[in-house]
Image: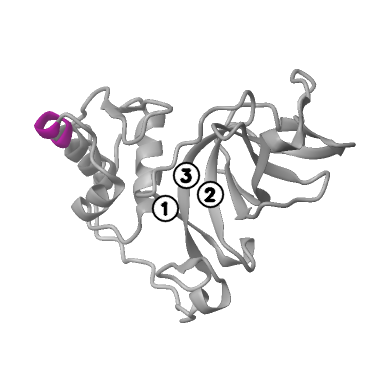
Amino acid sequence: MLTTKQHELLVFIDKHLRQTGCSPSFEEMKEALDLRSKSGIHRLITALEERGFLRRHKHRARALEVVRLSDDLNPPTREIPKFAPTIIQGDFTGKLPGVRAAVAAGAVSLPLYGRIAAGLPIEALQDNDEEIEVPASLVGLGEHFALLVEGDSMIDAGIFDGDTVIIRKGETAETGQIVVALIDRTEVTLKRLRRRGQSIALEPANIRYETRIFPPERVAIQGRLVALLRHY
């Protein structure tokens, strides 16, 4: 059964697709459901996808398909008091350059740039309309962004398909660190960086995959892994 918000979002997406021929943006969905952040929309879409109501087409921005509608709604049977935690106000933008403060203290909002291959490299998607809230303790100084992992080549490093990785932007990294690497200016992958003489090796953490070796001019470091989020 669907929650009230899941049902509202499913109906809104279906109506938008019928009227415009394309799926709504995260900003449009956030406003339609009167939510405070786009990360809430991301969680609703993931839940609808897992339950078989939505299908998300990979490698295409804003590509949602309604598989089926349902009137099977599961509203609360009684009024449940909302949890009202004590909020400690803080200006995180001043302490964390390049990161916007989220509504609740202790969290920051990062851009979520589509999916990144942890197997064979794929072209990175950059849907700048989408954001995700993460605990402020997961990020430090500097500019950060988030990526959804796709593939299983980093499972021995504890990184699984569907995980969200937090990346600190930067063009340099130490050998042995897990990095986002841009190959030939078109392909992006998540791998462990190794320096072998004048060459750069992008090493998987799964024996089923081979290490790929490139001359340095073919590889540009986009950032390094600093944290990981997982939904159960």
Decide which of tag 1 and tag 3 comes sooner along the chain.
Answer: 3
Label 2: which residue? 146
Decide which of tag 2 and tag 3 comes sooner along the chain.
Answer: 3
Label 3: which residue? 113
Label 1: which residue? 131
Res 208 quadrant in image: top right
Q: CA distance from mark 2 to mark 1?
A: 8 Å
The residue shown at (45%, 37%) is 125
Point out residue 40 in the picture as x, y percentages from the top left corner: 37, 52
Query: Who is closer to the viewer here, 44 or 21?
Result: 21
Q: Are marks 2 and 3 in contact (CB under 8 Å)?
A: yes
| Circle 3 SS class | strand
Point out residue 163 in the picture as x, y percentages from the top left corner: 58, 39
The residue shown at (67%, 52%) is 171
Image quadrant holding the C terminus, namely top right
Q: Are marks 2 and 1 in contact (CB under 8 Å)?
A: no
Query: Who is closer to the viewer here, 71 or 61?
Result: 61
Give the overall secondary structure of the magenta segment. helix
Please state which amino acid type lies under the numbered disc 1. Answer: Glu
Q: Does the magenta portion include 8? A: no
Q: Is residue 76 visible?
A: no
The residue shown at (56%, 57%) is 144
Disc 2 packing (10 Å; few <14; some 14–19; many ≥20): many
Q: Which of labels 1 and 3 is toward the front? A: 3
Disc 3 packing (10 Å; few <14; some 14–19; many ≥20): some
Please state which amino acid type lies under the numbered disc 2. Answer: Ala
Point out residue 42 in the picture as x, y percentages from the top left corner: 39, 45
Q: CA distance from mark 1 to mark 3?
A: 8 Å
Give the magenta range: 16-20
Please state which amino acid type lies under the numbered disc 3. Answer: Tyr
Query: Who is closer to the viewer here, 99 or 47?
Result: 99
Point out residue 141 in the picture as x, y percentages from the top left corner: 63, 68
